[in-house]
Amino acid sequence: MAKKRKTTKTTDRPNPKTARVIDDALKGKGLSGPMTWEEAKAEILS
C-alpha cells in the first residue's frame, strides 16, 4: 500500500498547537503550499 503524502494541513501535524506557528514561519520565509511535515520542518530550521 502506497504511503499517503502528507500536506501541511493542521490535521496532519504531530502537534496541532504548533500549526499556526509553523504556518507563520513558512509565510515569513515566503513559503506555502503542500509539502510534507519533514520538508516544512527542514525549511523552518534551515
Image: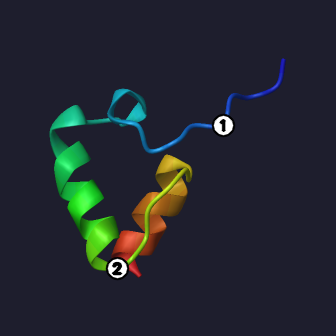
Q: Is residue 26 left or right of residue 16?
A: right
Judge the density around disc 2: few (<14), some (14-19), many (≥20) Cα neighbours within 10 Å: few
x 34%, y 79%: residue: 29
In the displayed orientation, state which residue is furthest to the top. 1
Q: Does 43 appear above or below 35?
A: below
Q: Where does label 2 land, which residue?
A: 29
In this figure, which residue is indicated by the disc labeled 1? 5
Q: CA distance from mark 2 to mark 1?
A: 23 Å
Report the residue at 15% width, 38% height from top: 17
Q: Is 10 rendered above or below residue 36?
A: above
Q: How far across and how far down the image is residue 44, in percent?
A: 35, 71
Q: Position of residue 36 (x, y in %)?
A: 55, 49
Q: Quadrant of the N terminus?
A: top right
- Residue closest to the eye, 28 or 18: 28
Q: What residue type is disc 2 on?
A: Lys
The percent position of residue 38, horizontal first and vertical second, equals 51, 55
**Residue 28 horizontal/vertical position (percent):** 26, 76
Q: Nearer the viewer, residue 3 or 22?
A: 22
Q: Amino acid at mark 1?
A: Arg
Q: Secondary structure at mark 1?
A: loop
In the displayed structure, 16 sits above or below 18; it is: above
Residue appearing at x 33%, y 35% in the figure: 10
